[in-house]
Amino acid sequence: MSRTRLLLDLQKLDLTRDAALARLSRVAAALAASPAIAEAEAAIRSAEAALAEADRILRARTAEREDLQAHVHAEEQKLYGGAFKNPREVQNLQRETDSLKRRLATVEDAVLEAMLARDEADAVLTQARQTLADAARDGAARHAELVDERGKLSAVVRKVDARRAVLLGAIQPSDHAVYERLRRAKAGRAVAELDGRACGTCGMEIP
């Protein structure tokens, strides 16, 4: 076999090895990171915080309603219990009771809004948890695919290395040194076949 043919065969092996190693690097990076799961976990933390705040507001509104209900009940007991005989005092008490009832109606609306907000926050959290479960399931399947691909790529590299070692035994050291120098200078391609009078790699015509 000619010296150039040996170097061309070595070039083909090295290109195959380079491509496998580059893909192995990307597979390793993909195995080390799972952005979908990280995003889902962040969404859960945000939804949990929102639900906790909605619970706090609902408790506060409910407590305010209960206090007002008790206050209204106490004022009505005074109003209808006959404790006050003076018409002016009865009138003032009636106005105060009506004012409390108006406030109570406003607070009851706020309680209803807080309950709806709490239900919405709970639904968001439920959806975020489902998204995480889906991401974990999809991630597990993807992880298995990547592990399988990593094994196949590693096998390719081992096979190429074995063939490369045999081929290097037939290449003159001086030719190999020139080849490696050109590989470093030419982005991994030291040898190219001619296609007629044109370079098989770049297509430029050779004088």
Image (spheres, rainbow, N blue to C red):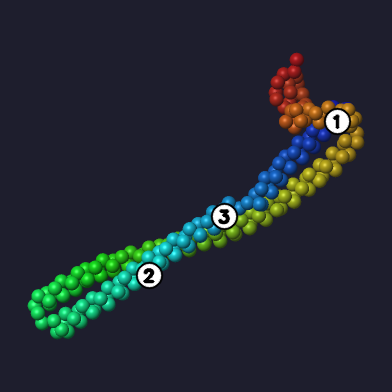
Residue 59: % across, % down: 38, 70
Identify the residue position indicated by label 2 in the image.
Answer: 59
Location of residue 21 by image quarter? top right
Position above or below: 35 against 53 = above
Q: Amino acid at mark 2?
A: Arg
**Spatial separation of the CA atoms under disc 3 and disc 1:** 48 Å
Which residue occupies the foreground of this view, 117 or 87?
87
Q: Amino acid at mark 3?
A: Ala
Which residue occupies the foreground of this view, 173 or 78?
78
- Which of marks 1 and 3 precedes in the sequence? 3
Say the numbered circle drawn on residue 176.
1
Front disc: 3 or 2: 2
- Which of marks 2 and 1 precedes in the sequence? 2
Q: How many marks?
A: 3
Say the numbered circle drawn on residue 38.
3
Location of residue 184 by image quarter? top right
Which residue occupies the foreground of this view, 131 or 67?
67
Query: Is residue 115 visible to the viewer in this orientation of the structure?
Result: no
Q: Residue at x 79, y 33 (%)?
A: 11
